[in-house]
Amino acid sequence: MDVPSFNGIIQKSIIDNWDLDALTDYKGATLQYHDVARKIEKLHIMFENSGVSKGDKIALCGRNSANWAVAFLATLTYGAIAVPILHEFTADQVHNIVNHSEAKLLFAGDVVSTTIDATKMPMLEGIIYIPDYSLILSRTDKLTYAREHLNEMFGKKYPKYFRKEHVNYYLDSAPDELAMINYTSGTTGFSKGVMIPYRALWSNYDFAEDVLGKTIKKGDNTISILPMAHMYGMAFEFMFEFLHGCHVFYLTRIPSPAIIAQAFADIRPAIIIAVPLIIEKIIRKKVFPKIQNNRMRLLMSMPMISKKVREKICAQVVNAFGGKFEEVIIGGAAFNQEVEQFLYGIGFPYTVGYGATECAPIICYEDWRKFVPGSCGKAALHMEVKIDSHDPENVPGEILARGLNVMLGYYKNEEATRETLDDEGWYHTGDLGTMDRDGNVFIKGRSKNMLLGANGQNIYPEEIEDKLNSLAMIVESIVIQKDDKLIGLVFPDFDEAKSMGFSNEDLEKIMEENRQQLNSTLPAYCKISAIRIHQEEFAKTPKKSIKRYLYYE
Protein backbone atom coordinates (compact mmCIF):
# COMPACT_ATOMS: atom_id res chain seq x y z
CA MET A 1 0.00 0.00 0.00
CA ASP A 2 1.20 3.52 -0.82
CA VAL A 3 1.90 5.25 2.51
CA PRO A 4 2.07 9.08 2.31
CA SER A 5 4.77 11.07 4.10
CA PHE A 6 3.72 11.53 7.73
CA ASN A 7 5.87 14.66 8.04
CA GLY A 8 4.18 15.90 4.87
CA ILE A 9 0.84 15.71 6.70
CA ILE A 10 2.31 17.67 9.65
CA GLN A 11 3.60 20.30 7.20
CA LYS A 12 0.24 20.55 5.40
CA SER A 13 -1.71 20.89 8.68
CA ILE A 14 0.54 23.73 9.85
CA ILE A 15 0.20 25.60 6.53
CA ASP A 16 -3.56 24.98 6.13
CA ASN A 17 -4.37 25.98 9.73
CA TRP A 18 -1.82 28.81 10.00
CA ASP A 19 -4.01 31.28 11.92
CA LEU A 20 -6.02 28.80 14.02
CA ASP A 21 -5.38 28.06 17.70
CA ALA A 22 -3.28 24.88 18.00
CA LEU A 23 -1.95 24.11 21.49
CA THR A 24 -2.92 25.57 24.88
CA ASP A 25 -1.62 24.84 28.35
CA TYR A 26 -4.94 24.81 30.28
CA LYS A 27 -5.25 28.13 32.12
CA GLY A 28 -2.01 29.22 30.39
CA ALA A 29 -0.72 30.47 27.03
CA THR A 30 -2.01 29.47 23.57
CA LEU A 31 0.12 28.75 20.50
CA GLN A 32 -1.46 29.15 17.07
CA TYR A 33 -0.30 26.89 14.23
CA HIS A 34 2.05 29.63 12.93
CA ASP A 35 3.58 29.93 16.45
CA VAL A 36 4.20 26.18 16.43
CA ALA A 37 5.88 26.51 13.00
CA ARG A 38 8.12 29.32 14.23
CA LYS A 39 9.21 27.37 17.33
CA ILE A 40 9.85 24.23 15.24
CA GLU A 41 12.01 26.30 12.89
CA LYS A 42 14.09 27.65 15.78
CA LEU A 43 14.63 24.15 17.14
CA HIS A 44 15.65 22.95 13.66
CA ILE A 45 18.24 25.76 13.49
CA MET A 46 19.52 24.74 16.91
CA PHE A 47 19.69 21.04 15.90
CA GLU A 48 21.47 21.84 12.65
CA ASN A 49 24.07 24.14 14.20
CA SER A 50 24.77 21.87 17.15
CA GLY A 51 25.58 18.87 14.96
CA VAL A 52 22.38 16.81 15.22
CA SER A 53 22.05 14.60 12.14
CA LYS A 54 19.02 12.88 10.64
CA GLY A 55 18.58 9.56 12.43
CA ASP A 56 20.02 10.82 15.74
CA LYS A 57 17.90 10.11 18.82
CA ILE A 58 16.30 12.93 20.80
CA ALA A 59 14.63 12.03 24.12
CA LEU A 60 11.74 13.95 25.73
CA CYS A 61 10.71 13.60 29.37
CA GLY A 62 8.25 15.95 31.05
CA ARG A 63 4.59 16.48 31.80
CA ASN A 64 2.28 17.22 28.87
CA SER A 65 2.59 20.78 27.61
CA ALA A 66 2.48 22.75 24.37
CA ASN A 67 6.29 23.03 24.39
CA TRP A 68 6.64 19.23 24.82
CA ALA A 69 4.43 18.77 21.74
CA VAL A 70 6.46 21.31 19.73
CA ALA A 71 9.76 19.61 20.65
CA PHE A 72 8.33 16.26 19.53
CA LEU A 73 7.10 17.70 16.21
CA ALA A 74 10.47 19.42 15.68
CA THR A 75 12.29 16.12 16.23
CA LEU A 76 10.22 14.17 13.68
CA THR A 77 10.12 16.90 11.05
CA TYR A 78 13.92 17.28 11.25
CA GLY A 79 14.33 13.57 10.50
CA ALA A 80 15.61 12.68 13.98
CA ILE A 81 14.18 9.79 16.02
CA ALA A 82 11.99 10.74 19.00
CA VAL A 83 12.34 8.86 22.30
CA PRO A 84 9.39 9.92 24.54
CA ILE A 85 9.87 8.95 28.21
CA LEU A 86 7.09 8.83 30.82
CA HIS A 87 7.70 11.69 33.26
CA GLU A 88 6.61 9.38 36.10
CA PHE A 89 9.67 7.15 35.66
CA THR A 90 12.31 7.40 38.39
CA ALA A 91 15.58 9.21 37.65
CA ASP A 92 17.39 5.85 37.27
CA GLN A 93 14.82 4.69 34.74
CA VAL A 94 15.22 7.90 32.74
CA HIS A 95 19.01 7.45 32.77
CA ASN A 96 18.59 3.84 31.57
CA ILE A 97 16.39 4.81 28.62
CA VAL A 98 18.52 7.79 27.58
CA ASN A 99 21.63 5.55 27.63
CA HIS A 100 20.00 2.51 26.01
CA SER A 101 18.52 4.61 23.19
CA GLU A 102 21.85 6.48 22.68
CA ALA A 103 19.98 9.79 22.75
CA LYS A 104 22.08 12.81 21.75
CA LEU A 105 19.79 15.42 23.35
CA LEU A 106 17.23 15.28 26.15
CA PHE A 107 14.30 17.70 26.52
CA ALA A 108 13.48 17.72 30.25
CA GLY A 109 10.44 19.18 32.04
CA ASP A 110 10.45 21.37 35.14
CA VAL A 111 10.14 18.52 37.66
CA VAL A 112 12.22 15.94 35.79
CA SER A 113 15.11 18.37 35.36
CA THR A 114 15.51 18.59 39.16
CA THR A 115 15.71 14.80 39.66
CA ILE A 116 17.98 13.54 36.86
CA ASP A 117 21.78 13.31 37.09
CA ALA A 118 23.62 14.27 33.90
CA THR A 119 26.77 12.41 35.00
CA LYS A 120 24.78 9.16 34.70
CA MET A 121 24.03 9.90 31.01
CA PRO A 122 27.57 10.26 29.59
CA MET A 123 26.59 10.08 25.90
CA LEU A 124 24.22 13.06 26.07
CA GLU A 125 25.49 16.22 24.39
CA GLY A 126 22.89 18.45 26.00
CA ILE A 127 19.78 18.77 28.19
CA ILE A 128 17.19 21.34 27.10
CA TYR A 129 14.62 22.77 29.54
CA ILE A 130 11.13 22.24 28.04
CA PRO A 131 9.39 25.36 29.47
CA ASP A 132 11.67 27.83 27.61
CA TYR A 133 14.14 25.65 25.63
CA SER A 134 17.08 27.05 27.60
CA LEU A 135 20.14 24.86 28.13
CA ILE A 136 20.42 22.98 31.41
CA LEU A 137 23.57 21.25 30.19
CA SER A 138 25.80 21.57 27.16
CA ARG A 139 28.79 19.33 26.55
CA THR A 140 29.74 20.83 23.17
CA ASP A 141 30.78 24.33 22.12
CA LYS A 142 28.56 23.98 19.05
CA LEU A 143 25.41 23.48 21.12
CA THR A 144 26.28 26.33 23.50
CA TYR A 145 26.94 28.68 20.56
CA ALA A 146 23.77 27.57 18.69
CA ARG A 147 21.54 28.23 21.72
CA GLU A 148 23.18 31.56 22.62
CA HIS A 149 22.93 32.89 19.06
CA LEU A 150 19.61 31.26 18.13
CA ASN A 151 17.53 34.44 17.71
CA GLU A 152 20.33 36.05 15.73
CA MET A 153 20.60 33.01 13.39
CA PHE A 154 16.81 32.91 12.99
CA GLY A 155 16.74 36.63 12.14
CA LYS A 156 19.51 36.19 9.56
CA LYS A 157 17.71 33.29 7.89
CA TYR A 158 14.33 35.10 7.83
CA PRO A 159 15.17 38.84 7.75
CA LYS A 160 11.58 40.00 6.97
CA TYR A 161 9.32 37.55 8.78
CA PHE A 162 8.66 33.82 8.90
CA ARG A 163 5.93 32.79 6.42
CA LYS A 164 4.03 29.68 5.32
CA GLU A 165 6.33 29.14 2.34
CA HIS A 166 9.31 28.77 4.68
CA VAL A 167 7.82 25.62 6.24
CA ASN A 168 9.95 22.89 4.70
CA TYR A 169 10.27 19.58 6.55
CA TYR A 170 12.00 16.23 6.12
CA LEU A 171 9.63 14.44 3.72
CA ASP A 172 11.79 11.62 2.34
CA SER A 173 11.11 8.99 4.99
CA ALA A 174 10.41 5.47 3.72
CA PRO A 175 7.33 3.80 5.30
CA ASP A 176 9.55 1.42 7.30
CA GLU A 177 11.93 4.14 8.47
CA LEU A 178 12.21 4.43 12.25
CA ALA A 179 10.30 7.47 13.59
CA MET A 180 10.30 6.88 17.33
CA ILE A 181 11.31 4.45 20.06
CA ASN A 182 8.73 4.05 22.83
CA TYR A 183 9.89 2.25 25.96
CA THR A 184 7.38 -0.01 27.67
CA SER A 185 9.42 -0.01 30.88
CA GLY A 186 12.24 1.91 32.44
CA THR A 187 14.36 -0.80 34.07
CA THR A 188 17.47 -1.92 32.19
CA GLY A 189 16.84 -5.67 32.44
CA PHE A 190 13.25 -5.27 31.31
CA SER A 191 13.57 -2.35 28.89
CA LYS A 192 11.83 -2.90 25.60
CA GLY A 193 12.22 -0.03 23.19
CA VAL A 194 9.37 -0.45 20.72
CA MET A 195 10.60 0.69 17.29
CA ILE A 196 7.71 2.53 15.65
CA PRO A 197 8.07 3.28 11.92
CA TYR A 198 6.51 6.18 10.01
CA ARG A 199 3.95 3.84 8.42
CA ALA A 200 2.52 2.99 11.87
CA LEU A 201 2.15 6.68 12.79
CA TRP A 202 0.44 7.37 9.46
CA SER A 203 -1.76 4.27 9.71
CA ASN A 204 -3.05 5.22 13.18
CA TYR A 205 -3.71 8.77 11.96
CA ASP A 206 -5.52 7.45 8.86
CA PHE A 207 -7.65 5.17 11.08
CA ALA A 208 -8.60 8.16 13.28
CA GLU A 209 -9.45 10.27 10.21
CA ASP A 210 -11.65 7.43 8.94
CA VAL A 211 -13.65 7.00 12.16
CA LEU A 212 -13.63 10.57 13.54
CA GLY A 213 -12.67 12.87 10.67
CA LYS A 214 -16.23 13.47 9.47
CA THR A 215 -17.64 14.44 12.87
CA ILE A 216 -14.76 16.46 14.31
CA LYS A 217 -14.16 19.79 12.60
CA LYS A 218 -11.19 22.13 12.25
CA GLY A 219 -11.01 24.45 15.21
CA ASP A 220 -12.84 22.04 17.55
CA ASN A 221 -11.54 21.89 21.11
CA THR A 222 -10.01 18.68 22.49
CA ILE A 223 -8.34 17.81 25.81
CA SER A 224 -5.09 15.92 26.31
CA ILE A 225 -5.08 14.12 29.67
CA LEU A 226 -3.09 10.95 28.99
CA PRO A 227 0.71 11.30 28.86
CA MET A 228 1.96 11.95 25.31
CA ALA A 229 4.88 9.65 26.11
CA HIS A 230 2.29 6.84 26.06
CA MET A 231 1.21 5.81 22.53
CA TYR A 232 -2.53 6.01 23.28
CA GLY A 233 -2.28 9.67 24.36
CA MET A 234 0.26 10.45 21.63
CA ALA A 235 -1.82 9.06 18.73
CA PHE A 236 -5.37 10.00 19.72
CA GLU A 237 -5.16 13.01 22.03
CA PHE A 238 -2.42 14.84 20.16
CA MET A 239 -1.30 13.69 16.69
CA PHE A 240 -4.71 13.12 15.08
CA GLU A 241 -6.15 16.35 16.51
CA PHE A 242 -3.13 18.45 15.53
CA LEU A 243 -3.11 17.03 12.00
CA HIS A 244 -6.86 17.60 11.71
CA GLY A 245 -6.66 21.29 12.65
CA CYS A 246 -8.11 21.01 16.15
CA HIS A 247 -7.22 23.03 19.24
CA VAL A 248 -5.57 20.79 21.88
CA PHE A 249 -5.69 21.79 25.56
CA TYR A 250 -3.10 20.25 27.90
CA LEU A 251 -3.85 19.57 31.55
CA THR A 252 -0.26 20.27 32.52
CA ARG A 253 -0.51 19.13 36.14
CA ILE A 254 -1.45 15.60 37.18
CA PRO A 255 -5.22 16.13 37.05
CA SER A 256 -7.65 15.23 39.85
CA PRO A 257 -11.24 14.21 38.97
CA ALA A 258 -12.39 17.71 40.07
CA ILE A 259 -9.89 19.45 37.73
CA ILE A 260 -10.82 17.10 34.86
CA ALA A 261 -14.54 17.76 35.39
CA GLN A 262 -13.89 21.52 35.47
CA ALA A 263 -11.79 21.28 32.28
CA PHE A 264 -14.57 19.38 30.48
CA ALA A 265 -17.04 22.13 31.46
CA ASP A 266 -14.67 24.94 30.36
CA ILE A 267 -13.28 23.43 27.16
CA ARG A 268 -16.29 21.35 26.00
CA PRO A 269 -14.21 18.91 23.92
CA ALA A 270 -15.48 17.47 20.62
CA ILE A 271 -14.07 14.01 21.41
CA ILE A 272 -13.02 12.38 24.66
CA ILE A 273 -10.23 9.82 24.74
CA ALA A 274 -9.83 8.29 28.18
CA VAL A 275 -8.68 5.39 30.28
CA PRO A 276 -11.44 3.69 32.32
CA LEU A 277 -10.43 5.16 35.67
CA ILE A 278 -11.11 8.76 34.58
CA ILE A 279 -14.59 7.83 33.34
CA GLU A 280 -15.30 5.65 36.38
CA LYS A 281 -14.30 8.37 38.87
CA ILE A 282 -16.49 11.01 37.22
CA ILE A 283 -19.47 8.61 37.04
CA ARG A 284 -19.03 7.51 40.67
CA LYS A 285 -18.51 11.05 42.03
CA LYS A 286 -20.80 13.12 39.81
CA VAL A 287 -23.55 10.76 38.63
CA PHE A 288 -24.13 7.77 40.92
CA PRO A 289 -24.84 9.88 44.05
CA LYS A 290 -27.71 11.58 42.19
CA ILE A 291 -29.35 8.41 40.90
CA GLN A 292 -28.61 5.73 43.48
CA ASN A 293 -31.57 6.50 45.70
CA ASN A 294 -34.89 4.71 46.16
CA ARG A 295 -36.89 7.28 44.17
CA MET A 296 -34.67 6.96 41.07
CA ARG A 297 -34.53 3.17 41.32
CA LEU A 298 -38.32 3.08 41.44
CA LEU A 299 -38.67 5.40 38.42
CA MET A 300 -36.14 3.38 36.40
CA SER A 301 -38.02 0.16 37.10
CA MET A 302 -41.34 1.51 35.69
CA PRO A 303 -41.58 0.45 32.02
CA MET A 304 -43.79 3.40 31.02
CA ILE A 305 -41.38 6.11 32.13
CA SER A 306 -38.00 4.38 32.53
CA LYS A 307 -37.00 5.32 28.94
CA LYS A 308 -37.57 9.01 29.69
CA VAL A 309 -35.71 8.75 32.98
CA ARG A 310 -32.77 7.04 31.28
CA GLU A 311 -32.67 9.74 28.59
CA LYS A 312 -32.64 12.40 31.30
CA ILE A 313 -29.81 10.63 33.16
CA CYS A 314 -27.89 10.24 29.89
CA ALA A 315 -28.21 13.99 29.26
CA GLN A 316 -26.80 14.66 32.75
CA VAL A 317 -23.84 12.33 32.14
CA VAL A 318 -23.18 13.92 28.72
CA ASN A 319 -23.24 17.30 30.46
CA ALA A 320 -20.69 16.09 33.05
CA PHE A 321 -18.26 15.60 30.14
CA GLY A 322 -18.83 19.02 28.58
CA GLY A 323 -21.95 18.25 26.53
CA LYS A 324 -20.40 18.74 23.09
CA PHE A 325 -18.55 15.50 22.27
CA GLU A 326 -19.35 12.95 19.56
CA GLU A 327 -18.27 9.92 21.57
CA VAL A 328 -16.06 8.76 24.42
CA ILE A 329 -13.37 6.27 23.42
CA ILE A 330 -12.09 4.17 26.30
CA GLY A 331 -8.95 2.05 26.25
CA GLY A 332 -5.66 1.25 27.95
CA ALA A 333 -7.05 -0.88 30.80
CA ALA A 334 -10.02 -3.11 31.71
CA PHE A 335 -13.33 -1.27 32.09
CA ASN A 336 -15.36 -1.73 35.28
CA GLN A 337 -18.41 -3.84 34.38
CA GLU A 338 -20.85 -2.02 36.66
CA VAL A 339 -19.99 1.34 35.07
CA GLU A 340 -20.05 -0.11 31.53
CA GLN A 341 -23.49 -1.70 32.06
CA PHE A 342 -24.78 1.59 33.45
CA LEU A 343 -23.49 3.61 30.46
CA TYR A 344 -24.88 1.09 27.98
CA GLY A 345 -28.23 1.04 29.80
CA ILE A 346 -28.71 4.82 29.47
CA GLY A 347 -27.58 4.91 25.80
CA PHE A 348 -24.38 6.88 26.50
CA PRO A 349 -22.14 7.24 23.38
CA TYR A 350 -19.08 5.28 24.46
CA THR A 351 -16.93 2.61 22.88
CA VAL A 352 -14.02 0.51 24.17
CA GLY A 353 -10.97 -0.01 21.96
CA TYR A 354 -7.93 -2.26 22.25
CA GLY A 355 -4.31 -1.60 21.46
CA ALA A 356 -0.67 -1.99 22.39
CA THR A 357 2.45 0.16 22.22
CA GLU A 358 3.72 -2.37 19.66
CA CYS A 359 0.88 -1.28 17.32
CA ALA A 360 1.27 2.47 17.95
CA PRO A 361 -1.35 1.65 19.42
CA ILE A 362 -4.65 0.66 17.77
CA ILE A 363 -5.62 -2.98 17.14
CA CYS A 364 -9.44 -3.05 17.57
CA TYR A 365 -12.23 -0.47 17.50
CA GLU A 366 -15.93 -0.13 16.69
CA ASP A 367 -18.16 2.94 16.44
CA TRP A 368 -20.32 3.36 19.57
CA ARG A 369 -23.52 2.85 17.57
CA LYS A 370 -22.47 -0.69 16.60
CA PHE A 371 -20.31 -1.48 19.61
CA VAL A 372 -21.07 -4.75 21.44
CA PRO A 373 -20.84 -4.29 25.25
CA GLY A 374 -18.08 -6.33 26.85
CA SER A 375 -16.08 -6.42 23.61
CA CYS A 376 -13.22 -4.18 22.46
CA GLY A 377 -14.47 -3.80 18.89
CA LYS A 378 -13.25 -5.33 15.63
CA ALA A 379 -9.95 -5.21 13.76
CA ALA A 380 -9.15 -1.54 13.06
CA LEU A 381 -8.48 -0.08 9.60
CA HIS A 382 -5.19 -1.41 8.12
CA MET A 383 -5.16 -4.28 10.65
CA GLU A 384 -6.01 -8.00 10.72
CA VAL A 385 -6.78 -9.80 13.97
CA LYS A 386 -7.11 -13.52 14.66
CA ILE A 387 -7.39 -15.77 17.71
CA ASP A 388 -4.88 -18.59 18.03
CA SER A 389 -7.48 -21.21 18.99
CA HIS A 390 -9.13 -24.25 17.35
CA ASP A 391 -12.51 -22.68 18.27
CA PRO A 392 -12.07 -18.87 18.45
CA GLU A 393 -15.72 -18.26 19.36
CA ASN A 394 -15.72 -20.44 22.45
CA VAL A 395 -12.15 -21.33 23.44
CA PRO A 396 -9.88 -18.38 24.31
CA GLY A 397 -6.57 -18.19 22.50
CA GLU A 398 -3.81 -15.63 22.10
CA ILE A 399 -4.85 -12.49 20.20
CA LEU A 400 -2.63 -12.01 17.13
CA ALA A 401 -2.49 -8.80 15.07
CA ARG A 402 -0.93 -7.96 11.71
CA GLY A 403 -0.85 -4.85 9.54
CA LEU A 404 0.62 -1.40 8.98
CA ASN A 405 0.45 -0.50 12.68
CA VAL A 406 2.84 -3.23 13.79
CA MET A 407 6.28 -2.21 15.09
CA LEU A 408 9.62 -3.03 13.46
CA GLY A 409 10.72 -4.86 16.62
CA TYR A 410 12.41 -4.08 19.93
CA TYR A 411 15.48 -1.84 19.85
CA LYS A 412 18.69 -3.84 20.42
CA ASN A 413 16.68 -6.89 21.50
CA GLU A 414 16.43 -9.44 18.69
CA GLU A 415 15.47 -12.26 21.03
CA ALA A 416 12.39 -10.43 22.36
CA THR A 417 11.53 -9.40 18.78
CA ARG A 418 11.63 -13.04 17.60
CA GLU A 419 9.42 -14.09 20.53
CA THR A 420 6.81 -11.43 19.68
CA LEU A 421 6.81 -11.11 15.86
CA ASP A 422 6.51 -14.33 13.85
CA ASP A 423 7.74 -15.02 10.31
CA GLU A 424 4.34 -14.15 8.81
CA GLY A 425 4.28 -10.70 10.43
CA TRP A 426 1.80 -11.53 13.21
CA TYR A 427 2.33 -9.66 16.46
CA HIS A 428 1.71 -11.98 19.43
CA THR A 429 -0.04 -9.74 21.97
CA GLY A 430 0.21 -12.06 24.98
CA ASP A 431 -3.48 -11.38 25.63
CA LEU A 432 -6.14 -14.09 25.58
CA GLY A 433 -9.46 -13.55 23.84
CA THR A 434 -12.32 -14.89 21.79
CA MET A 435 -13.91 -13.55 18.61
CA ASP A 436 -17.56 -13.83 17.59
CA ARG A 437 -18.78 -14.45 14.03
CA ASP A 438 -18.98 -10.72 13.34
CA GLY A 439 -15.33 -10.20 14.26
CA ASN A 440 -15.88 -8.62 17.69
CA VAL A 441 -13.00 -9.39 20.03
CA PHE A 442 -13.54 -10.17 23.72
CA ILE A 443 -10.48 -10.02 25.98
CA LYS A 444 -10.46 -12.87 28.50
CA GLY A 445 -7.20 -12.23 30.30
CA ARG A 446 -3.51 -11.57 29.94
CA SER A 447 -1.26 -14.49 29.24
CA LYS A 448 1.70 -12.22 29.78
CA ASN A 449 2.10 -10.96 33.30
CA MET A 450 1.92 -7.25 32.54
CA LEU A 451 -0.51 -5.25 34.67
CA LEU A 452 -2.05 -1.91 33.73
CA GLY A 453 -1.96 1.15 35.96
CA ALA A 454 -4.99 3.37 36.43
CA ASN A 455 -3.86 5.69 33.61
CA GLY A 456 -2.86 2.91 31.26
CA GLN A 457 0.79 2.70 32.34
CA ASN A 458 2.44 -0.67 31.82
CA ILE A 459 3.43 -2.34 35.11
CA TYR A 460 5.76 -5.31 34.98
CA PRO A 461 5.36 -7.29 38.22
CA GLU A 462 8.66 -9.15 37.69
CA GLU A 463 10.55 -5.86 38.07
CA ILE A 464 8.88 -5.12 41.41
CA GLU A 465 9.25 -8.76 42.58
CA ASP A 466 12.91 -8.62 41.66
CA LYS A 467 13.38 -5.71 44.10
CA LEU A 468 11.07 -7.25 46.73
CA ASN A 469 12.96 -10.55 46.77
CA SER A 470 16.18 -8.78 47.66
CA LEU A 471 14.70 -7.21 50.82
CA ALA A 472 14.96 -8.50 54.40
CA MET A 473 13.43 -11.87 55.27
CA ILE A 474 11.74 -12.41 51.85
CA VAL A 475 12.24 -15.73 50.04
CA GLU A 476 9.85 -15.18 47.11
CA SER A 477 7.00 -12.91 46.11
CA ILE A 478 4.22 -12.18 43.62
CA VAL A 479 2.72 -8.79 42.86
CA ILE A 480 -1.01 -8.86 42.10
CA GLN A 481 -3.56 -6.16 41.31
CA LYS A 482 -6.75 -5.68 43.31
CA ASP A 483 -9.00 -2.95 41.90
CA ASP A 484 -6.41 -0.26 41.06
CA LYS A 485 -4.04 -1.15 43.92
CA LEU A 486 -0.92 -3.33 43.81
CA ILE A 487 -0.40 -5.88 46.58
CA GLY A 488 2.75 -7.88 47.27
CA LEU A 489 2.23 -11.48 48.39
CA VAL A 490 5.40 -12.67 50.08
CA PHE A 491 6.67 -15.96 51.46
CA PRO A 492 9.09 -14.98 54.26
CA ASP A 493 12.10 -16.89 55.52
CA PHE A 494 10.30 -18.48 58.49
CA ASP A 495 13.37 -20.54 59.51
CA GLU A 496 15.49 -17.40 59.77
CA ALA A 497 12.69 -15.61 61.65
CA LYS A 498 12.43 -18.48 64.12
CA SER A 499 16.21 -18.60 64.70
CA MET A 500 16.17 -14.87 65.44
CA GLY A 501 13.19 -15.16 67.77
CA PHE A 502 10.89 -13.00 65.62
CA SER A 503 7.15 -13.17 66.27
CA ASN A 504 4.49 -12.82 63.56
CA GLU A 505 4.05 -9.23 64.70
CA ASP A 506 7.79 -8.60 64.21
CA LEU A 507 7.55 -10.04 60.69
CA GLU A 508 4.60 -7.74 59.90
CA LYS A 509 6.68 -4.72 60.99
CA ILE A 510 9.66 -5.86 58.89
CA MET A 511 7.40 -6.25 55.86
CA GLU A 512 5.98 -2.74 56.36
CA GLU A 513 9.54 -1.37 56.45
CA ASN A 514 10.30 -3.39 53.29
CA ARG A 515 7.23 -1.89 51.61
CA GLN A 516 8.32 1.66 52.40
CA GLN A 517 11.88 0.98 51.25
CA LEU A 518 10.63 -0.61 48.01
CA ASN A 519 8.20 2.24 47.27
CA SER A 520 10.95 4.83 47.62
CA THR A 521 12.57 3.30 44.50
CA LEU A 522 9.41 3.02 42.36
CA PRO A 523 7.34 5.47 40.27
CA ALA A 524 3.99 6.45 41.84
CA TYR A 525 1.89 4.09 39.69
CA CYS A 526 4.05 1.06 40.66
CA LYS A 527 3.95 1.57 44.43
CA ILE A 528 2.75 -1.34 46.59
CA SER A 529 -0.19 -0.50 48.85
CA ALA A 530 0.19 -3.57 51.11
CA ILE A 531 2.34 -6.63 51.71
CA ARG A 532 0.54 -9.82 52.71
CA ILE A 533 2.44 -12.68 54.31
CA HIS A 534 1.89 -16.08 52.71
CA GLN A 535 2.28 -19.01 55.10
CA GLU A 536 3.64 -21.52 52.58
CA GLU A 537 5.73 -21.58 49.42
CA PHE A 538 3.95 -20.61 46.21
CA ALA A 539 2.91 -23.46 43.88
CA LYS A 540 5.37 -23.95 41.00
CA THR A 541 5.41 -25.33 37.46
CA PRO A 542 7.95 -28.06 36.51
CA LYS A 543 10.18 -25.18 35.34
CA LYS A 544 10.00 -23.79 38.89
CA SER A 545 8.14 -20.63 37.93
CA ILE A 546 5.28 -19.61 40.22
CA LYS A 547 1.76 -20.51 39.03
CA ARG A 548 0.63 -16.88 39.19
CA TYR A 549 -2.95 -17.48 38.14
CA LEU A 550 -3.63 -19.37 41.39
CA TYR A 551 -3.08 -16.16 43.35
CA TYR A 552 -4.94 -13.59 41.25
CA GLU A 553 -7.99 -12.19 43.00
Image (cartoon, helix red, strand yellow):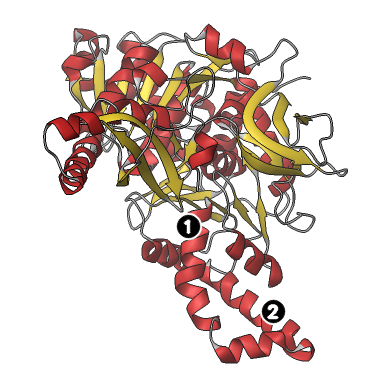
- Quarter-wise, where is residue 49 in the image? top left
- Residue 449 appears at what percent x and percent y? 51, 32
**Residue type beneath disc 2:** Glu
Can you say whether 124 is above or below 475 in the image? above
Which residue corresponds to the image point at 17% horizontal and 23% vertical from the top-left? Answer: 117
Which residue corresponds to the image point at 41% horizontal and 28% vertical from the top-left? Answer: 462
- Residue 341 appears at what percent x and percent y? 66, 65
- Describe the element under mark 1 as helix, strand or loop: helix
Residue that label 2 marks = 311
Alpha-carbon span between mark 2 and mark 1:
22 Å
**Residue type beneath disc 1:** Ile
- Residue 107 appears at what percent x and percent y? 31, 27
Q: Hey, which residue is sitting farthest right in the picture?
A: 437
- Quarter-wise, where is residue 177 in the image? top right
Q: Is residue 192 visible?
A: yes
Q: Is residue 379 visible?
A: no
- Quarter-wise, where is residue 382 in the image? top right
Compared across the picture, whether 360 is left or right of 261 comes to right
- Describe the element under mark 2 as helix, strand or loop: helix
- Residue 509 appears at what percent x and percent y? 16, 46
Residue that label 1 marks = 278
Mark 2 crowdedness (10 Å alpha carbons): few <14, some 14-19, many ≥20: some
Which residue corresponds to the image point at 57% horizontal and 13% vertical from the top-left? Answer: 417
Compared across the picture, whether 221 is left or right of 382 comes to left
Can you say whether 10 is above or below 219 in the image? above
Quadrant location of the N terminus in the rendered image: top right
